[in-house]
Image: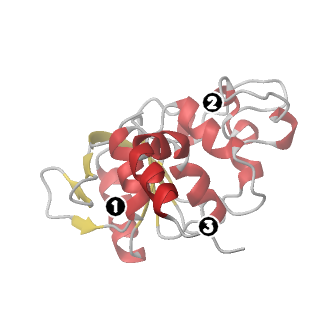
């Protein structure tokens, strides 16, 4: 799935240390394909023991929507399960904004076309305030320029991303696609490589 530029409203989740078991509880990890995990995203926060939606949880609030999740510090900590990224993507998120991501979660997200944008804590706090004042606030994510801004407001920041992963996102490549696109370069390297035994 290619990613270039996105404009979207945001869903705020101002909670710190959200771990992968909270994102997708372990009892839902039995499937071997990526589809269907979104229905159990934040399952124990979204639904009670009778499978009734919990009105106070942000994903059940019709006031908020969009393809961008704005989360508190240390999002995606805990176990290394890739299913957390699967669940977020399957639910419809394209971007997660936080002031800090667990390293394994960051890599899993990028490998599944989910863009984790790490921002300064002050910027994150301001963004939460903007969304709280107006749930219709729209952010613009420009991946080629590596910028995040709030449309109509003087709120903008740059973000970092590994060059390889940026190219993969821009072109919709996974790791295998990337290598296939460089088949000629790989063949040239192999033909001219000096083997030492």
Q: Nearer the viewer, mark 1 or mark 2?
A: 2
Q: Nearer the viewer, mark 3 or mark 2?
A: 3
Query: Is residue 156 left or right of 105 when viewed as pictured?
Result: left
Residue on which disc 1 sits: 127
Q: Position of residue 77 (x, y in %)?
A: 69, 63
Q: How is the image coloured?
A: secondary structure
Nearer-N-terminus badge (1/3) = 3
Residue at 61 percent across and 33 percent down: it is: 55
Nearer-N-terminus badge (3/2) = 2
Q: Position of residue 91 (x, y in %)?
A: 55, 31
Q: Image quadrant of residue 84?
A: top right
Q: Position of residue 146 (x, y in %)?
A: 27, 60
Query: Is residue 157 left or right of 57 when viewed as pictured?
Result: left
Q: Name the residue nearer the viewer: 41 or 58.
A: 41
Which corner quadrant holds the C terminus? bottom right
Residue at 36 percent across and 51 percent down: it is: 167
Residue on which disc 3 sits: 103
Residue on which disc 2 sits: 38
The kind of secondary structure element at disc 2 is helix
Q: Nearer the viewer, mark 1 or mark 3?
A: 3
Above or below, 50 against 141 in this view is above
Determine the CA span between mark 1 and mark 3. Answer: 23 Å
């Amino acid at each position: 799935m290619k990613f270039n530029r996105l404009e979207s409203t945001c869903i705020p989740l101002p909670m710190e240390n959200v771990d992968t078991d909270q994102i997708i509880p372990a009892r839902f990890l039995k499937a071997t394909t990526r589809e269907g995990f979104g229905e159990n995203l934040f399952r124990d926060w979204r639904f009670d023991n009778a499978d009734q939606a919990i009105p106070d949880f942000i994903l059940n609030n019709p006031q908020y929507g969009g393809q961008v999740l704005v989360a508190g510090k240390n999002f995606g900590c805990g176990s290394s399960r890739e299913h957390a990224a699967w669940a977020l993507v399957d639910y419809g998120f394209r971007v997660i904004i936080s002031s800090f991501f667990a390293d394994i979660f960051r890599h899993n997200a990028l490998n599944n076309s989910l863009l984790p944008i790490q921002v300064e804590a002050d910027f994150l706090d301001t963004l939460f305030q903007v969304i709280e004042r107006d749930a219709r606030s729209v952010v613009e994510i420009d991946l080629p320029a590596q910028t995040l801004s709030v449309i109509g407001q003087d709120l903008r920041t740059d973000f970092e991303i590994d060059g390889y992963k940026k190219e993969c996102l821009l072109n919709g490549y996974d790791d295998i696609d990337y290598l296939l696109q460089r088949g000629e370069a790989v063949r040239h390297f192999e033909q001219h490589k000096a083997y030492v035994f």
